[in-house]
Image (tube, rainbow, N blue to C red):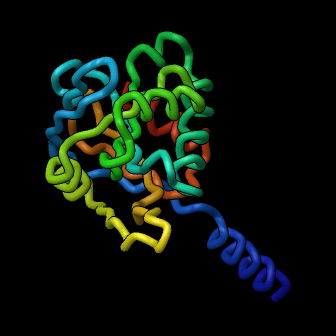
C-alpha cells in the first residue's frame, strides 16, 4: 500500500513536465521568404534543416524567449552541424519589420539567426501549412498594436517536410535533440 502514494506522486510530477515535441505531418512545406541577404526558400532547395519561429521585433515576450532558446540550441551544436541548420524568424508584422530591422533584431540573439518576411498572404499560407496562425490586434489609441502568434517552433527536415513542432517552452536541449535527429 505504501507504493500507491509514491506512484501517484510520480504520475503528478510527470504531468508537470513540458510537453514532448510532437512529430510533424511529413508534408512538404513550400515557402519563399525575403531576408536582408536575399531570398530564403524551402529546405528542399538546399537540403538544410530549418527551425522556424513566427514572431516580430516588437513582441514583448514570446519572440524574444523563443529566439534566445533557439540561439542557445544553435550554440550547443557542433560547427559542422551548425552549417546544416538555419534558424529563421518569420515576421508576422511586415508593416514594421523591414529586412534591415529584422537583421538587426536577430543579430542581437545570434549571428546565424535570420529574419525573414513575405507578403501577408504568403506568411498566412505558411503558418496554415504548419498548423498555426497569427492575428493582428486592433491598434491602441497611441497607434501601437500587438500581433498574437504561437510560441511554438517548427522544424523542417532537409527535404522541406514538417518533421516536428516544438511546444512553447521547449528547452535548448530538446531543440538540439530534435535537430540532431534530422542531421
| 42 versus 122 height, above or below | above
Q: Residue furthest front?
A: 142
The percent coordinates of residue 97 (x first, y second) are: 38, 42
Q: What residue do we see at 26% from left, 20% from top?
A: 38
Dividing the image into 4 quarters, which one contains the N terminus? bottom right
Q: Is residue 44 left or right of residue 1?
A: left
Counting from the top left corner in percent of width and height, residue 142 is at: 49, 67
The answer, for residue 181, to whether it is visible in the render is no
The one of 38 and 25 positioned closer to us in this rendering: 38
Q: Residue at x 38, y 18 (%)?
A: 84
- Quadrant for the C terminus in the image: top left
Nearest the viewer among 9 and 38 is 38
Please indicate, yes or no, whether residue 176 appears anywhere in the rendered image. Answer: yes
Report whether 155 appears left or right of 25. right
Q: Estimate the x, y position of residue 58 in percent, counting from the top left.
A: 50, 51
Total labels: the figure holds: 0
Asked whether, in this view, residue 171 is left or right of residue 54, the answer is right
Quadrant of residue 133 in the image?
Answer: bottom left
Q: Residue furthest bottom?
A: 1
Indicate whether 174 appears above or below 132.
Answer: above
Q: Residue at x 35, y 45 (%)?
A: 91
Residue plotted at (43% across, 48% down): 56
Quarter holding residue 136:
bottom left
Residue 87 or residue 155, whichever sits in front: 87
Amino acid at each position: 500500500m505504501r507504493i500507491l502514494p509514491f506512484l501517484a506522486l510520480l504520475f503528478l510530477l510527470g504531468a508537470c513536465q513540458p510537453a514532448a515535441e510532437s512529430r510533424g505531418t511529413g508534408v512538404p512545406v513550400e515557402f519563399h521568404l525575403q531576408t536582408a541577404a536575399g531570398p530564403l526558400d524551402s529546405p528542399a532547395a538546399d537540403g538544410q534543416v530549418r527551425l522556424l519561429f513566427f514572431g516580430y521585433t516588437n513582441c514583448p515576450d514570446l519572440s524574444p524567449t523563443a529566439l534566445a532558446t533557439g540561439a542557445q540550441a544553435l550554440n550547443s551544436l557542433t560547427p559542422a552541424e551548425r552549417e546544416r541548420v538555419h534558424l529563421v524568424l518569420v515576421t508576422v508584422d511586415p508593416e514594421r519589420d523591414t529586412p534591415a530591422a529584422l537583421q538587426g533584431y536577430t543579430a542581437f540573439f545570434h549571428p546565424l539567426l535570420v529574419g525573414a518576411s513575405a507578403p501577408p498572404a504568403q506568411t498566412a499560407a505558411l503558418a496554415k501549412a504548419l498548423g498555426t496562425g497569427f492575428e493582428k490586434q486592433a491598434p491602441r489609441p497611441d497607434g501601437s498594436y500587438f500581433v498574437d502568434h504561437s510560441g511554438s517552433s517548427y522544424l523542417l527536415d532537409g527535404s522541406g517536410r514538417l518533421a516536428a513542432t516544438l511546444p512553447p517552452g521547449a528547452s535548448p536541449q530538446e531543440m538540439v535533440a530534435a535537430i540532431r535527429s534530422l542531421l
